[in-house]
Amino acid sequence: MLNLKKMTLAFVTAVALTGFAGGTAQDASASAYSTVSSTSMTKTAYHKKSTSGAVYNASHTKVVAKLKSYPNTTWYATKKVTLKHNGKKAVYYKVKNGAGTKSGIVWHKYVVKGAAPFGLKYAKAAVAYDADSNKTVWSKNGNTARPIASVSKIMTLYLVQEKAAGSSGSWSSKVNTSYSGLKRMGLDSACGGFRFTKNSYTVKQLFDAALIDSSNNAAIALGQWVAGAQHQPPTKKFITMMNSQADEWGLKHTNFVSSSGLEQSDLRTFGYSIGGSDANMVSANDVAIIADHLITDFPSTLTTAKVKSMTLSGQTLYNYNNMLPGRKYYSASLNVDGLKTGYTPKAGYCFVGTGQKSGHNRIITVVLHDENEFTETKSIMNMAYNKNLL
């Protein structure tokens, strides 16, 4: 009786793994498959039903694509194929992905009719935001606060422009950059970039360095200027201003501890740690709202954000936004003109993108803790436009 039960269990398992009782999806060449019939069908969209299954070559001897590796792929079927294997028949679809890079046959029970829901493979949080109607039109973990690295600078630069536009400052105002901690930061291989070779720069010069080159010491110096600091911090005044602005905008998933986006563990080395949590924690949705305020209240930000490189004080400021014209991920139709990149090991690759396709509203996209930030940003933008979400 025990052996019979084992044999029955083995048979059921085999049937569950494939369309036939004689083999599994991973053992495609256990014995020959033959085509019984092949019938053309109206092109129909399918997507994976679960993590099981694979697309095979026409003779069912080789796996072309494991379905679990294509979680958001739509497969287009054009033929219904009946195969025979070990005396059993099963129905397959002849399919091809939308890009046309993968094609083969798939057992009909591994897929379900309809286009695959849109999703991202790498980003742990992401949103697509309509800057004209001020609403999020697509989201993945959009309200989960995460470290955002140098994306934090969009709040700093908002407050800088607010002061520069008022009566207490201007673009030509001088900012004290004589602090030893900031000079050391500029020379640091991990945290540096723009070197302070002078004891003061104008607000506009440091603004350009912070936005284009993502200079951390420039962002911190600008924060001191906004807060009216007359001596080297640590000071919590500007950080308090950042959080107060977030509160004023009703952001519920935002907490700043750094004007640059560097974590406290890095800032401590240079004397700029204020204590508390290690990193700025902001949700993708809140990031989009901050970015919306920045480019709506101060549209000239985009003039600077789309500068690919420039020379300042004998140093090159390089913009790492690789969706700008001439860069690897540029797309003319998307017309991307901003906005801000970011990276730390804790935050991963982060990117706030914005652009306006002809005939559509302006889009703001945010991806946090990504591994392929520009490709996934491009995917979000194309999806939002193709589905007329904005």
Image: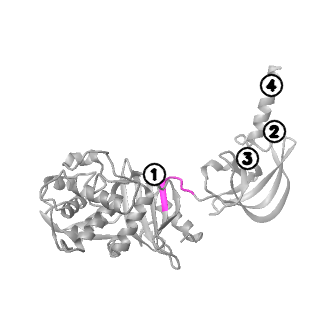
The residue wearing badge 4 is 5
State the extent of the magenta-drawn residues as a range.
119-127
Residue depicted at 55% across the width and 71% down the height: 385
Query: Callout 3: helix, strand or loop?
Result: loop
Front disc: 2 or 1:
1
Q: Where is residue 327 in the image (x, y as percent from the top left)?
A: 42, 68
Above or below for 221 versus 264: below
**For this view, does 182 lie left or right of residue 336?**
left
**For this view, does 174 lie left or right of residue 369?**
left
Q: Distance between the residues labelled 2 and 4?
A: 16 Å
Q: What type is the residue that disc 3 sits on?
A: Thr
- The numbered mark, 3 or 2, whose residue comes first in the sequence reads 2
- The numbered mark, 1 or 4, whose residue comes first in the sequence reads 4
How crowded is the residue under tag 3: few (<14 C-alpha within 10 Å), some, or many (20+)?
Answer: some
Query: Callout 1: helix, strand or loop?
Result: loop
User: Are circles 1 and 3 on residues that touch, CB within 8 Å?
Assistant: no
The residue wearing badge 3 is 61
**For this view, does 86 lie left or right of residue 333?**
right
Front disc: 3 or 4:
4
- The numbered mark, 2 or 4, whose residue comes first in the sequence reads 4
- Mark number displayed over residue 144: 1
Residue depicted at 39% across the width and 58% down the height: 251
- The numbered mark, 3 or 4, whose residue comes first in the sequence reads 4
User: Are circles 3 and 4 on residues that touch, CB within 8 Å?
Assistant: no
Q: What type is the residue that disc 4 sits on?
A: Lys
Q: How far apart are marks 2 and 1 (CA)?
A: 46 Å
